[in-house]
Image (tube, helix red, strand yellow):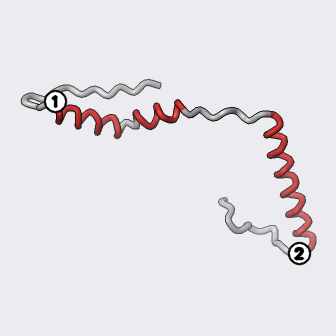
Amino acid sequence: MATNVEIKSKPNENPLSMIRRFSRSSQQANVVSRVKQGSYKSRALSDFEKKKIKLRKIKRKQEFERLYKLGKVSKGRRKGRRK
C-alpha cells in the first residue's frame, strides 16, 4: 500500500524548511511506521503451537468449572476481563 507525500516548494522557501515540511507531513501520514511494520512480519503459528494453545484453554475452562462447582468462584463477570 503506497502513500505518496508530495511537497511543492513555496516561493522564497529555503531547502531546509522544505525538508522540515516534508518530514512533518510524512510523520502525519504514518509512512515510516507502516514501512517498519512490514519489515517485522510475524510468523504464522504452527499446528503444534495452535494445539498447545487450545489445550491450555480447555484446561483453564475445566479448572474454572471445577472451582465453580466447589463454590469458590461465581459465574459472573471475572476480574480483569473486558466485556
In the image, is residue 12 above or below residue 51? above
In the figure, is residue 11 to the left or right of 65?
left
x 24%, y 28%: residue: 7
Quadrant housing the C terminus: bottom right
Dot 1 amino acid type: Pro
Q: Quadrant of residue 12?
A: top left
Q: Residue at x 84, y 57 (%)?
A: 60
How busy is the neighbourhood of tag 2: few (under 14 within 10 Å), some, or many (20 plus)? few
Q: Residues within 10 Å of mark 1 (few under 14, many from 20)?
A: few
Q: How many tags in the picture?
A: 2
Circle 2: element type: loop
Check the image and report above or below for 9 versus 25: above
Gap between marks 1 and 2 measured at Cα:
72 Å
* Rendering coords of residue 63 (x, y %): 88, 62
Q: Position of residue 79 (x, y in %)?
A: 70, 68
Q: Is residue 79 above or below residue 50?
A: below
Residue ID for mark 1: 15
Residue under circle 2?
Answer: 71
* Quarter assignment of residue 76: bottom right
Question: Which mark is in front, 1 or 2?
Answer: 1
Q: Secondary structure at mark 1?
A: helix
Question: In x, y percent, where is residue 81?
Answer: 68, 62
Drawn side of residue 6 relative to residue 77, left or right: left
